[in-house]
Amino acid sequence: MKWWRHWIAAIVLISFHAWGNEDVEQALFSKGPAPAKGDSGKWGFRSPDGSWAVEPKFLEVKPFQHEVAAARMDKTWGYIDKTGNWKIPPRFTWAGEFSENLAPASEGDHLTGKFGYIDPQGRWAIEAEYSWARPFQEGFGCVKDGAKWGFVDAKGKLVVEPDFDQAQSFSGGLAAVQKSGPPGDKETWTYIKPDGSSPFEKKFAWAGSFYEGLARIQTTDRITGKYGYINPKGELVIPTSFDEASDFHQGRAQVRLGNEIRSIDPKGKPIE
């Protein structure tokens, strides 16, 4: 039995994706060695054959992205290469994954430290001035200023002012955002374009990111509302009838209706 079998099974169960073991194995090693915990309780990285590519000596690690991985040995984070050597020496109190040649990071304390973005050499590309920052996606980083979320471009310019209570990264040219409305208003999620405008007026109780041209949404209520799927025009293409639903991956999504779990295609039809 390969060493990663039980790990893969757990990932599939937890993430609720309709992936087979081969899909998950490919995803785990697509960027390089995969994170794994050793007998000592410390983390390293394993190769597909189960051997240690990087010996387990770190307190925390994150997956490889763009040939480096964030890792922490003591109180500070840095970035290692695939041999386990420091590419960017540890100096950050928090470090995120690289995406589009930028990574969110902070050098301040955990309570008051500010977040910005570093380049592959560890230099600040966007100064640390935000309450939180997420990895770049489709040319924009999702940043939090105080209690509100907005978006910056790769030069650090605010392209969407921090005006939202919740926000997700751009995907498929749109970002799901939420702004609280009047008391009792449960449909407060919508989508925006990079200029901050909304492509349609429809709002939802919850809205997810677009994958393969479809996004999960809930209507009526966040707690009891059923899941369905919309297209980038805001049109409901798969009715809100599911108790749980995953994002689409390779033409299928996994959904639950009562005690029944099934896979569906982009038209909502069951896949045997």
Image (cartoon, rainbow, N blue to C red):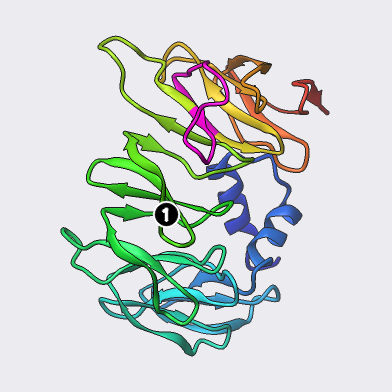
The residue that appears at 61% across and 30% down in the rendered structure is 215
- Which amino acid type is marked by label 1? Arg
Q: Is residue 269 above or below residue 154?
A: above
Where is mark 1, residue-wise?
134
Instruction: Say above or below: 145 vs 47.
Output: above
The image shows a total of numbered marks equal to 1
Q: Residue at x 51, y 26 (%)?
A: 198
What crowding class fits label 1: few (fewer than 14 Cα within 10 Å), some (14-19), or many (20 or more)?
many
Tell me which segment is drawn in magenta: 191-208
Residue furthest out toward the right: 272
- Residue at 61 percent of width and 74 percent of height: 33
What kind of element bears circle 1?
A: loop
Drawn side of residue 130 relative to residue 177, left or right: left
Asked whether, in this view, residue 149 is left or right of residue 22, the answer is: left
Query: In this view of the protein, can residue 260 be seen by the observer?
Result: no
Question: Residue at 32% of width from left, 33% of height from top?
Answer: 165
